[in-house]
Image (cartoon, grey):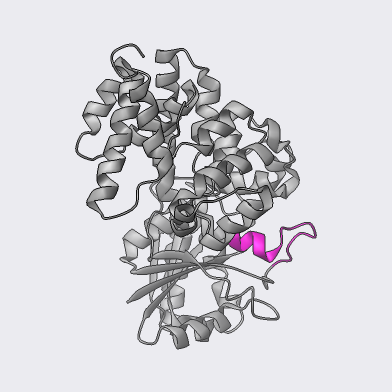
Amino acid sequence: MKLGIYGGTFNPPHLGHVTAARFAMDALGLDKLLLIPAAHPPHKSLPEDAPSPEDRLAMAEIAADVLLLPGRAEASGMELSRPGRSYTADTLRQLREEYPGAELWLLMGTDMFLTLQHWREPEAILSLAGVCAFARSQEDCEEALRGQADYLQKTFQARVRTVRLPEIVDISSTRLRELLERGEGQEYLPPSVYGYIIRRGLYGVRRDLKCLPERELRACSYSMMRAKRIAHVQGAEEEAVRLARRWGADPVKAARAAILHDCTKYLEREEQLQLCEKYGIVLDELERQAVKLLHSKTGAWIARDVFGADDEVFEAIYWHTTGKADMSLLDKILYMADYMEPNRDFPGVERLRTLAYEDLDAAVIAGCETSIQEMEDRGLEVHRNTLAARDFLLKNGKGTGNS
């Protein structure tokens, strides 16, 4: 196994880190990559107002997840849990014990690479791991990189690779922190990392979470879910806005409901139940057994309590998974947008997409019936609210071209 080790303060992790990590994985053919935030870097001191180790690890975890390589790219808190300075030689020894037989590769930028011989125990570092140095700006001197590579190979018998990144994201973490404190610099961050910064109030970023513009609301929502889910949420937002314009609903409310509809989807069962208890959400027996039914309810409450969602948006999120009898227009729009957004692919989805713009009630009936059939085919209980949603529309003559 080829294991890449990418260390640093990650204060904060930005698009330059993500670009370098992605390119190094491809260039070296890495099987696994670890982003390892330093607790106490030996070459510099963290600013006094630096985020906590837990926050830096959380941001590194988000950055690793952005790579969309589950099981291959992840963050490790090994240096944060180790007392004293975060020396690379100690980290490599620990990794050698944890991954015996693995081929270790240490990833670093130009500045670190050009001073590697002055680190603590360079002989040990270069005997334990190969070094991959990447230039992160056009100004990085290829001659200096080649000269340093030759020196390390001759002096330490080091394994060295130097690569130039095809996409340049040239920003230092110090400069980025200065920009963030001025309300700038978001373009240098993965949106989900920026969302975490907003939610935690890091780097002087102070926002009223109940009054966020849509761009920052998206970032916050994305920071609460796995990166693989973001495409679905983006698709649901686009579909909800289109449906709102078609049927005369408020497109801003439709967008905000879609942005937040899955914000608690990745909470564990115990966290879901704790939120249910906190907000007084009464669960039936099926909901207690099927954790996937809880995120709509807990998400609605987080949308209201944390992000200031109004009653209409709250209700749409609350019922987007099961539906209910007598749904509002926004309820129906979010239910269908979630069901048929452009990334969805299942038998009958194209029919639903056509129907949703011809007869919204008929589309909701068809969506409910599809869900009911799927659950019955799998031998699972159908939630009573899905049956009620379908039956209410049928009883009241909906879905007959009069939406």
Compare residues 88 and 310 and report the one nearer the observer: 310
- The image quadrant that residue 132 belongs to is bottom left
Compare residues 307 and 190 and report the one nearer the observer: 307
Q: Position of residue 359 (x, y in %)?
A: 31, 17
143 horizontally vs 379: left or right: right
- The image quadrant that residue 7 belongs to is bottom right
* Residue 48 lies in the magenta-colored region: yes
- Residue situated furthest right in the rendering: 48
Residues rendered magenta in the picture: 44-59
107 horizontally vs 50: left or right: left
Q: Position of residue 69 (x, y in %)?
A: 37, 58
Is residue 65 placed above or below 233 in the rendered structure?
Answer: below
* Residue 118 lies in the magenta-colored region: no
Q: Position of residue 256 (x, y in %)?
A: 55, 30
- Residue situated furthest left in the rendering: 347
Q: Position of residue 39 (x, y in %)?
A: 67, 71
Residue 176 appears anywhere in the view: no
Is residue 301 placed above or below 74 in the rendered structure?
Answer: above
Compare residues 363 and 61 and report the one nearer the observer: 363
Is residue 158 placed above or below 260 in the rendered structure?
Answer: below
* Quarter in which the N terminus is drawn: bottom left
Compare residues 295 and 262 and report the one nearer the observer: 295
Q: Residue at x 28, y 36 (%)?
A: 369
- The image quadrant that residue 286 belongs to is bottom left
